[in-house]
Image: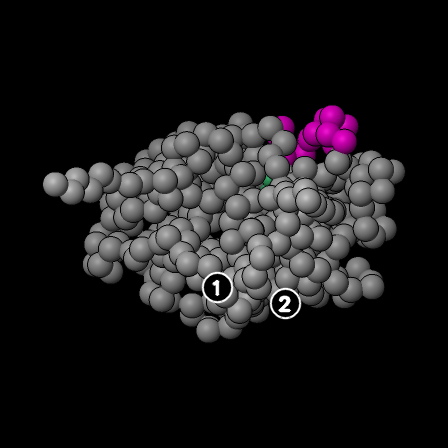
Amino acid sequence: MARLSMHDRLPYDEATTPPRVSTGDLPDPADVQRVVTEAFHLYQANADGVVADYIPALAAASPDLFGISVVGARGRSFEIGDVDTPFSIQSVSKPFVFALVCEAEGYDSARQHLGVNSTGFPFNSLMAVELNDARTMNPLVNAGAIATTSLVPGTTAEEKFEHVRDGLSRFAGRELSMSEDVYASEAGSNMRNHGIAHLLNSYGRLYFDPDAATDVYTRQCSLEVTVHDLAAMGATLANGGVNPESGDRVIAASVCRRVLAVMATAGLYELSGDWLYEIGVPGKSGVSGGIVTVAPGKGGLATFSPPLDPAGNSVRGQLVTKYLAERIGLNLFASEARPTLS
Ligand code: GLN
């Protein structure tokens, strides 16, 4: 008998036999808004963490900026604070670009090209590439993310970037554009990312010219979003791939669940295990201070606050997400004992 593996397709077509889901709803809208407001006031005075400065343009961000947005899977939003302030998306772009690549080439092939296991190393690690035979471990740290960008449809860097910009705009439900300032600043200081791309190329694990792929990746990280945009992008992943505000189907539901699985494994870099243990929901952070969290079937939660912990994750963002995950019931692993049958 042929050997079966967990990587094999199920013996039926997922597209025509949709899997059952295990999720519920958000609490009443008034309760969600109240708890979001509570979380804001509870953590507003927290002054821990340091604003990223390895990309010079990011160092100018005020540590006081703070916004929270929840977009429910039915398109209602609940928000407070600096919700209209644009900031560069940075690493929060990574799961969404991975989603676009899965949509284009299939999630099986994307897994084979990129991997879906966590590295246990910082986001910009070269050691992680050297120590793992597969070289790229997952699409959410820089090595895997640059490889992901190299797989985006398009024969030129321009076509690839336009595919990314258009796709992320559909996730957000509005046209996104790039911050020229942040792009110029990072493009002038990202030799390490070029190094990662060349290293991957030497192992045959990059799928486009290394410098051009790094440039598209840098543009992708410089796309400007608000915390509401990030919540809408998260809500699209919470809603089987359909943006609940625009009604646009951005990716297939079968892709969506795989993207969330990788976010759960690797979204907070080397602290991903701690995040899942404490908070219990897939998330993705970025060095400009954004975190997006996705509660499948319920909605997307986004926070924006620039001061970061040593791994590069927003301090207030983690605190708010932990609080909200408990108070509005987002933790995927939570259950309560039912009365026993007598
Ligand atoms: N553009 C940044 C970099 O590659 C993104 C890193 C991040 O947000 N963690 O260094």
Q: Where is residue 123, by image quadrant?
A: top right
Residue 104 sits above or below residue 184 on the image: below
Q: Is residue 4 left or right of residue 330?
A: right
Q: Residues within 10 Å of mark 1 (few under 14, many from 20)?
A: few
Magenta stretch: dominant secondary structure? loop
At 67% from the left and 47% from the top, the residue drawn is 111
Q: Position of residue 324 (x, y in %)?
A: 31, 44
Residue placed furthest toward the left:
342
At 38% from the left and 62% from the top, the residue drawn is 73
Residue placed furthest toward the front:
1
State the quadrant of the C terminus.
top left
Check if residue 124 falls in the magenta segment.
yes
Q: Nearer the viewer, mark 1 or mark 2?
A: 1
Mark 1 or mark 2: whose residue is earlier in sequence: 1
Between 55 and 261, the one lying in front of the other is 261
At 75% from the left and 55% from the top, the residue drawn is 151
Q: Residues within 10 Å of mark 2 (few under 14, many from 20)?
A: some
Residue type at mark 1? Answer: Pro
Residue to which mark 2 is pinned: 166
Q: Is residue 25 left or right of residue 30?
A: right
Answer yes or no: is residue 245 visible: yes
Residue type at mark 2? Answer: Asp
Residue to which mark 1 is pinned: 18
